[in-house]
Amino acid sequence: MNRTTLSLIAGVGALAAVTGFAALTSPDASGASPAKAAAELPVERTSLVCPAPSSSDLAETTYTSFTPVTKGTTSDGKAELLSAGEEPGAAADDKDGKDGKDGKDGKAGKGGRTAADKPVLTAKEPGKPVAEDASGADSPALVGTAEGKFAPGWTVQQTTRVAAGTGRGIQGVNCTAPDTEFWFPGASTAPDRTDYVHLTNPDDAAAVVDIELYGKDGALETTAGEGITVQPHSGEPILLSTLISEKQDNVTVHVSVRSGRVGASVQALDDKLGGDWIAASVDPTGSLVLPGIPKDATAVRLIAFAPGESDADLKVRLASPSGSITPAGNETLHVKGGMTSAVDLGDVMRGEPGSLVLTPTDRAVPVVAAVRVVRGKGAGQETAFIPASRAVGKRATAVDNTGKGTTLSVTAPSATAEIKVTASAGSEGGSAVSKTYTVKSGTTQQVEAPVPSGLKGTYALTVETVSGGPVYASRTLTSSQDGVLAFTVQTLPDDRGMVAVPEADEDLSVLQK
C-alpha cells in the first residue's frame, strides 16, 4: 500500500471523528479489507444554532447547555454560544479584513463580529448544565460550537416564556445542527396564525435557501420563496404570510439549501391558542413515530405530507400505557402525493398518555408528519407541536428540566426495551442519579423521571437504550401562567455523539517510512 492510499485512509478517518456524520464500513468478503470492524469513538467537534427567540417585549428566555459525560474523550475542549452577529460589519467577501475592518479596536471583522464579542453562554464541565437568561425582544439568533470533551451529545435548549399577546405561553426548541434540508408539517397561514421560518447561517459564506409551501391541494405559489440569501453569521426570520396570500390552516414547509448550510425552525404563534416552535420532522420515511402526547390533551391534529408523486396509505395506531389501539374512525390516513393531509383526532387520549405510530398499509411511501396538541379549554388553551422523531438510539438528552413540571414519555412501538434514565447534577447544585425502566412492546410509559438529590436550579435528563428497542421519547415542560397551563414538548432523538471509525488490520506506521 503506497503513501497516497495511507494518507487517504487517515484523512477519511479523521473527518469521521471530527464531524460525527461519517461512518466507514469494510468492503465485502470478495476483496481484501484494510480495516476490521468499526470502533465507536466520540465526535470531536459539533455545531448548533438557536433561532431568535421572540419579538415580544414581554419575553423571558433561558438558554441551557449540557454535555453528558462520555468515555474516551480528550481532557480539554470548550462549548460556547455566540450572537449570530446582527451589528453592521465587513462585507461577507472581505476575507482579508482590509480597510481597518479586521476586528481590532472593537471594529467589525469577518462575518459581522467584533473583537469585543463575548459568548452568551459558556459550558463549565460535562455532566453539569449551565444556564443563562435573556429578556425582551432584542435577543438575536445564536451560533454555537463544542469541541473536545464537550462535543459528544452536546444539547442546547431555548425556552421562552411570553406573558401575554400572540403566542403567549411557553415556547421551547432544541437548538439544531446546521443542515441542507428540513421538513415542517403543521405550519399555517390562517388569519389567527403568525408563523415564521427562522433561518440561521453559522458559516463565513452566505447561504442560499429555497422555501416551498404545500397545502391541501399541492404546491402553493410563493412570491419570494426562491433564492433567499442568508448572510454569514446571521439569522433571518421569514413570515410565511409574506410568501403567499392564500390562507390555509395546514401547510407543510420545505426548506432546501442551494449553497451553504443553515439551521431552521418554524415559530407558530396563535392569537388564541398560545404558541410554540415546530421542530423539523424526521426525514421522509415509510414508518413514523410521534412520541409523548400528554394524557390531558383536549385536541390532537395529525398533519402528514408525502413529498413524492405517489400516494401514501398509513395505518394509524396509538401506543397507550396498556398497549396498541386503533383510534375509532381514524384507522387509516390517505396522503396524496405532493399534498398536505390533516385529520383531527379529537379527545383521542381519554386520560392516558400515548404516542402515534404510523405504518404503511401496503407498500411503503416516504412521508413526514407532526401533531398539534392543545391542552386546556376556552381562554386557557395552549398549543405545542410534536414532530415525527428519530429513535433514542444509544443516547439522547433533554435539558432545562425542573423538579416539578417535567414529564418524560417513552414508547417501544415494536419490541420490549430496557432503558436507563440519568438525571444530571443541577445547574446550581445537586448530585446525579440514574434509574432503569422496562417499556413493554406497543406501549407508551409516562416515566417518573428521577430528580437529582439536593437539586438546585435545572437539570438534564439523558435516556440510553440498554437492550431491546427501538425506543422513542419526548419531554414535556409544564407551568401555570395566569391560569393557563402553559407547556412545550421536545422529542429526544439520538444525539449522534459517537462515530464509527475502522481499526486497521495491522500496524501501518512502518510502511510510511
Image (cartoon, grey):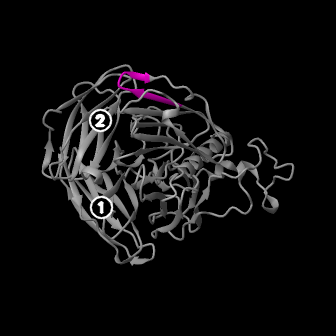
Q: Is residue 255 visible?
A: no
Residue beneath label 1, please?
A: 483
Q: 90 or 439: which is nearer to us? A: 90
x and y percent of residue 49 in the render? Answer: 54, 51
Where 276 sits versus 223, above or below?
below
- Number of numbered labels in the structure image: 2
Q: Residue at x 45, y 69 (%)?
A: 127
Q: CA distance from mark 2 to mark 1?
A: 38 Å
Q: Where's residue 7, x and y in %? A: 65, 44
Comparing 166 with 229, the one in front is: 166
Amino acid type, residue under disc 1 in the picture: Gly
Left or right of 300 in this view: 324:
left
Q: Is residue 229 left or right of residue 483?
A: right
Provide the major secondary structure of the magenta segment: strand
Q: Which residues are magenta?
A: 211-219
Instruction: From the image, tell me which residue sits under label 2.
Output: 287
